[in-house]
Amino acid sequence: MLLSSLELALQSLKTHKMRTFLSVLGMAIGIASIIVVFSAGAGVKGLLFDQIESFGMDSIQVEIKVPSGKKGIASEQQSAISLLQGAQVTTLKLDDLEDILKLSNVEDGYGLLMTQEAVTYRNKVYRTFIWSTGDTFINIDQTKVGSGRFFSKSENRSLARVVVLGSQVKERLFGDNDPIGKTIKIRKARFKVIGVMEERGSVMTFNFDDFIYVPIRTMHKKIMGVDFLHNIILKVADMEIVDETAEKIKMVLRDNHNIAPPKEIQEGWMDTGNDDFRVMSMTEILDLWNEMSSILTLLLVAIVAISLVVGGVGVMNVMFVIVNERTPEIGLRKAVGAKYSDIMKQFLVESILITFTGGVVGTILGILISFLVFIGANQFGIDWNFVLPIKSFVVAILFSIIFGVFFGIYPARKAARLNPIEAIWRED
């Protein structure tokens, strides 16, 4: 009986090719969108993991935070809003870094202060980012020196006016000429170029090739006239106790900044809202990004499901038309002994066949679009991975079958409940 119903369904769909095509297309677009969303979500996760890993998974980041007195997510939101509005936190200092480096599990670290300045070489002016950091940066970060050298501890201590150029800055200011030993101007101060970094590209929205690296103490005294940091990056010796190390870092900073230790803390949050800093390990950052990416993927799937509902309504309308067109046939079949279940099965098979075909076509289309996104991203220099999660195919096929049953069951019931005599009479 199932094969007979399938054969009848195929004959009916072949009879009205354009109507069938449009119904299948509606479902295919929705299913393709699901495949693309899951593939893009997996691609973003892979990209984020690679970029976070490039900072080193054995590291802890300390960054400034605007204290709000609120706990949990309210504190994070308030801090982000305040920083966007231009609030400055100037309590993170090099002294904090030196005290943190005394902890047994902290192997090394560097402070960081970033700003944007116009840089001049002869008649060329180029506005770029100044990445002021310590001499230990080159030992921790994955950025490597391509030519020349990085500045030393003694140069940092003595406020030496030396710089290392990112590869893009070197091209903009010097072209094919060797910049080593040349002098550039930052504001009104002259700096000697002692090195050029290898090309690295963008990591977490930062284009490392468009940076000029300056000793942090020189930046404080010779350029900006400040003494604070934006970030501290630390390398830990034992990842097994990274969480305990992060807690010890918080205690050091609270003691240095005269912040009372919290009586209680909400589990899962890094601070209580009174801290003027945030401490996170790279594993915590990765987990946070993964969670955000998963939520975004589910949100996009929910939005895509709306297009599937629209496609499903289109399938239901088509099934109503089919029922009306075949009313006399249904009446005749019931008159010669066809049961309610036989009629239901016939039209449900037809509805599922439309949506299943749409699911298969949509899956193929989604794979093709995902592959084109992969090619396009790599053409623009983005290290995008072509990933097709198994769950995307499972969701796509399940959606197509479920929607076929859901939107086909009402027209099928209408057909199965027809009075055979009234249905045959409509033939006249």
Image (tube, rainbow, N blue to C red):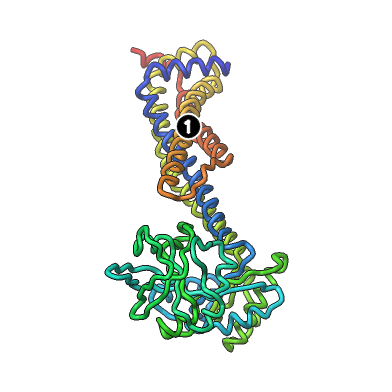
Q: Which residue has dot 1 on it? A: 364
Position of residue 138 measured from the top left corner of the image (x, y, whole percent): 56, 68
Q: Looking at the picture, which amino acid does disc 1 mark?
A: Ile
* Residue ID at (45%, 22%): 418
Residue farthest to the bottom, as pictured: 258
Residue farthest to the top, as pictured: 336
Which is nearer the eye, 278 or 121?
A: 121
Position of residue 106 measured from the top left corner of the image (x, y, whole percent): 67, 73
* Residue ID at (29%, 67%): 124
Position of residue 324 measured from the top left corner of the image (x, y, whole percent): 38, 22
Position of residue 267 measured from the top left corner of the image (x, y, whole percent): 64, 70
* Residue ID at (42%, 20%): 13
The answer to whether residue 278 is visible is no
The answer to whether residue 396 is visible is yes
**Does residue 237 appear left or right of residue 281 in this picture?**
right
Q: Is residue 259 above or below residue 278?
A: below
Which is nearer the eye, 377 or 390?
A: 377
Q: Secondary structure at mark 1?
A: helix
Residue farthest to the left, as pictured: 123
**Quadrant of the rendered image containing residue 426:** top left
